[in-house]
Amino acid sequence: MFARPAIAYIAQTFPALTQTFVYRETLALEQQGFDIVTCAIWRPAHSQLSQESEHLIARSAYVFPISWPRFLAVHLYFLLTRPGRYLGTLFFVLTRRGESARNRLRTLFHFCEAVYLAPEIKRRNVEHVHAHFAINAATIALVLARLLGISFSFTAHNIFFSDRILLSAKVREARFIVAISRFSKQFLLRLVPGVGIADKIHVIHCGLSPTDFAPASRPRNDVPRILFVAQLTERKGAPILVQACRVLAERGVAFRCIIVGDGPQRPLVEQLIEQCGLQERIELAGALPQEQLRECLARADLFALPCITAHDGD
């Protein structure tokens, strides 16, 4: 049995190569003496892990791959032993105003996933659940909190686009909310106004340990080295960087650009590099683990991240 109360962290995928801030936060809390239980919907592929996070898989609980006999048994258990909480929670999340039929169906799936994780949450004596991102994981945290009679919170990283499923209910039900900037807090308050809401939204900026990334000395490159690190999605602006590199090349500026990351815009970025004739100047390194990323940062003269607002508002 686990006597000491624990905190559960819920994520879409854990540990995720593009969300190092999540697993580093859990490790930092453990260093402060907290008992942390990590759960996720999906288990990451081994190729998407850094060495510093590999050990976290063995101690985390996952929904998928799902055991259907266990799935049915768990739902039947809570329906029979806690019918009021089970049915009440299901009714609550499926009847919020303003949600589309698609979002209600998604919510039903997340309800099922949350109940599937509930025995582990209960077994580990979890008294509080925290989710990163206000979408899928936060829905699971909300369901777990109502089902098990515990509290929950979430970090609202990205609330600027249209996928705001159950956002009002999450804000009002959460014990507290973490916003990663003052702008995020104000944006969230405009979306979900109300008495006392501002008091429970705390601004905590994303950060990292400077000693992990501070170079030992200034890099000595034959030509300036530009580094880009991000997912290749519209909002990160990699095509803009390629166009900027074309301007540099046309002006006779010597440089080398390393693009680290992968994503849906990779074919577009590859096409632009070829169209601009920059195959010898720009390298697409793909997604890299943290160990290799530190080397890239140490060798770079300039870091570029030309973010934009995507067409969907993201």
Image (cartoon, rainbow, N blue to C red):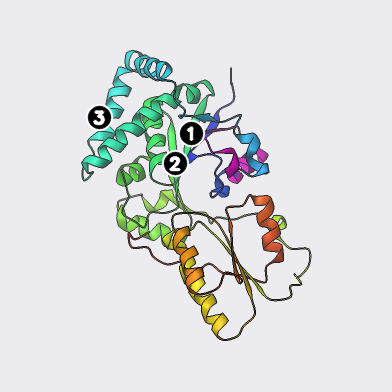
**Tag 1 residue:** 128
User: In the picture shown, does residue 195 fall above or below 257?
Assistant: above
The answer to whether residue 237 of the structure is visible from this angle is no
The tag on residue 91 is 3
In the picture, which quadrant includes the N terminus? top right
Q: Does residue 66 appear to the left or right of 111 in the view shown?
A: right
**Secondary structure of residue under mark 2:** strand
Between the C-alphas of marks 3 and 1, the distance is: 22 Å
Front residue of 195 and 299: 299
**Tag 2 residue:** 153
Q: Which residues are magenta?
A: 24-48
Residue 247's x, y, as percent? 52, 81
Front residue of 251 and 225: 251
- Give yes or no for residue 248 being in the magenta stretch: no
In the picture, which quadrant includes the C terminus? bottom left
Residue 221's x, y, as percent? 74, 72
The answer to whether residue 13 of the structure is visible from this angle is yes
The tag on residue 82 is none
Q: Mark 3 vs mark 2: which is more N-terminal?
A: 3
Residue 10's x, y, as percent? 48, 37
Q: Around disc 1, counting alpha carbons within 10 Å, would you say few (fewer than 14), some (14 to 19), or many (20 or more)?
A: many
Between the C-alphas of marks 3 and 2, the distance is: 21 Å
Between the C-alphas of marks 2 and 1, the distance is: 8 Å
Q: Residue furthest bottom?
A: 251
- Asked if the residue under mark 1 is in contact with the one under mark 2, i.e. CB atoms within 8 Å, the reply is yes
Q: Residue furthest right?
A: 217
Front residue of 86 and 271: 271
Three-letter code, disc 3: Phe
Q: Around disc 3, counting alpha carbons within 10 Å, would you say few (fewer than 14), some (14 to 19), or many (20 or more)?
A: few
User: In the picture shown, does residue 247 fall above or below 295?
Assistant: below
Q: Dividing the picture into quarters, in which one does residue 160 lie?
A: bottom left
Three-letter code, disc 2: Ser
